[in-house]
Amino acid sequence: MKTILSLFSFIFLLVSCEDVIEIDLDSVEPKLVIEGCINDLDDPCTIKLSKTGDYFEPGIYPIVSDALVTITDENGIETEFEESEPGTYTSESLEVEELGSYTLHIQSEGEDYMAEGVVPHKVFIDSLSYDIPPLFYEFEEGYMLTCYLQDPAEYRNYYRLIVYKKGEPKSSDGMMYIFNDDFMNGNMIFMSWESDPLFPQDTVVVELQTLDKSTYDYYFTLNSLAGGMFGASNPSNPETNLSNDALGYFGAYTVSRDTIVILPN
């Protein structure tokens, strides 16, 4: 009899575990997402606006049109951006100068958003080299590229290194190669590209971005949240210089590029 009761109780528990628990989830108010930067290149400056998605509509990020987007320099000269395509605002007339301060102002749906970026002192690539990687590296064939730069002692500098083969898209791994000169101020710095091996006849483009601090902080925390080389952290939003609880970033940086062709030894 005890065996029958125990079996009945076990079956009852299994059936009970199949009950569906419904949780009432509220929709979250979408937030404005701002993606844009200024640099010393001659390319048009672009600001992209969208909104965060809803839990019940994953993968849908509405674009934001009909916003007023301007950037004002430290001398009070204002440049208004045109909406070149839905959610994308572009200016070909904005003049960016090294060490200049620029304020982004966005008016959208009755709300104001602002951010400031300072274009840092430009640091140039000194030289590039490549060699067979040590035995403990992840790849055993091909070559490893190294970028050298002379860090100026009079500035605190923040860097991002991007490497890609000519004719191919820039590697997203460039986010991982962010560093500062805290322990290398005023010295020759070298950074080795360890993500992908390079092979003979590859034409490789190396881009060194010198970032302002807010842009560095954004990339650093974004990389940490993605579980990059600095380690993962608890889920949250990356640090941003945007006001009014907006997400994204308004970056400022200078660019130095160099190219090298991998030749067989």
Image (cartoon, helix red, strand yellow):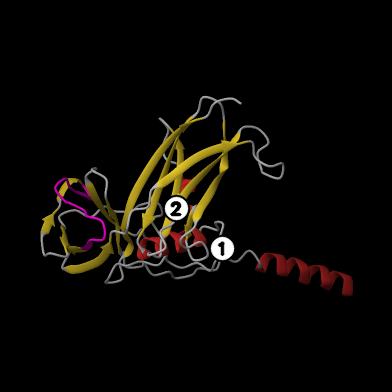
Q: Which residue is drawn at 16% across and 45% down?
A: 92
Q: In this view, does 72 lie to the left or right of 54?
A: left
| Quadrant of the rendering where the C terminus is positioned | top right
Q: Which residue matches tag 1?
A: 232
Q: Which residue matches tag 2?
A: 150
Q: Residue at x 40, y 65 (%)?
A: 156
Given residues 152 and 190, the one toward you in this image is 152
Identity of the amino acid at label 1? Ala
Q: Which of marks 2 and 1 is in front?
A: 2
Please tell me whether mark 2 sits on a helix, a strand or a loop. strand
Q: Residue at x 63, y 63 (%)?
A: 18
Q: Do the CB atoms of the residues marked 2 and 1 lie less than 8 Å apart? A: no
Label 2, label 1: how many angstroms apart (C-alpha)? Answer: 31 Å
Q: Quick check: is 115 in the magenta stretch?
A: no
- Is residue 7 shown above or below 56? below
Given residues 68 and 134, the one toward you in this image is 134
The spot of residue 51 in percent (x, y) is 30, 58
| Quadrant of the rendering where the N terminus is positioned | bottom right
- Which span of residues is magenta-colored? 86-102
Overall secondary structure of the magenta stretch?
A: loop
Q: Residue furthest bottom?
A: 2
- Is residue 90 shown above or below 140? below
Please tell me whether mark 1 sits on a helix, a strand or a loop. loop
Q: In this view, does 108 lie to the left or right of 262?
A: left
Could one spot residue 1 in this view of the protein?
Answer: no
Q: Determine crowd level at label 1: few under 14, some 14-19, many 20+ residues with C-alpha closer than 10 A.
A: some
The spot of residue 24 in percent (x, y) is 44, 70
Given residues 240 and 14, the one toward you in this image is 240
Could one spot residue 32 in this view of the protein?
Answer: yes
Identity of the amino acid at label 2? Gln
Task: Answer with mark 2 or mark 1, whichever residue precedes in sequence.
Answer: 2
The spot of residue 40 in percent (x, y) is 26, 49
